[in-house]
Image: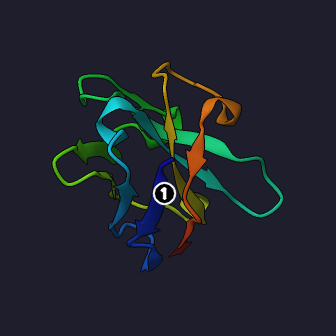
Amino acid sequence: QVELVESGGGSVQAGGSLRLSCAASGRTFSAHAMGWFRQAPGKERELVAAISWNGAGTYYKDSVKGRFTISRDNAKNTVYLQMNSLKSEDTAVYYCASSRYFRPGLPPAEYDYWGQGTQVTVSS
């Protein structure tokens, strides 16, 4: 069992930055790949970024490449999403999730545990 708790969301103007954190409980965190998803009103949940269990592999959605950075600290059981140059279209609820697998574009159904989400609002 893994419990995930996100933090760091908020409201920011376009061009600004936010850093999301996801703290995990459970001893198996370091064995799981982690992903950040987002869901805007009326839209499907989409994978924004993912990272392998040891951080050696990362994946980014095309629209966030060069602006977002995913990282993890297994000693702290925490995964991060640094978001720079934010745009209004980044507005969504952001969720972290864990999976036994790391594969680019892995769908939500392959993620086993989810956080409760944190709201990110970018105003133009």
Q: How many marks?
A: 1
Query: Residue at the spot x=35%, y=42% of the render?
Result: 29
Q: Nearer the viewer, residue 94 or 87?
A: 94
Q: Residue furthest right?
A: 42
Residue 16, placed above or below residue 75:
below
Question: Is residue 39 rendered to the left or right of residue 19?
Answer: right
Label 1 sits on residue:
3
Q: Secondary structure at mark 1?
A: strand
Query: Residue at the spot x=60%, y=58% of the render?
Result: 89
Q: Nearer the viewer, residue 122 or 28?
A: 28
Q: Residue furthest bottom?
A: 11
Question: Is residue 20 rendered to the left or right of residue 10?
Answer: left
Q: Position of residue 54 (x, y in %)?
A: 24, 28
| Amino acid bearing label 1 | Glu
Color scheme of the displayed model: rainbow
Q: Nearer the viewer, residue 18 or 22?
A: 22
Q: Position of residue 115 (x, y in %)?
A: 55, 59
**Looking at the rendering, which quadrant does residue 85 occupy?**
bottom left
Q: Position of residue 12 (x, y in %)?
A: 43, 78
Question: Is residue 78 rendered to the left or right of residue 119?
Answer: left
Q: Residue furthest left?
A: 75
Q: Residues within 10 Å of mark 1 (few under 14, many from 20)?
A: some
Residue 97, placed above or below residue 119:
above
Q: Position of residue 41 (x, y in %)?
A: 77, 64
Query: Residue at the spot x=57%, y=65% of the render?
Result: 117
Query: Residue at the spot x=27%, y=51% of the render?
Result: 77
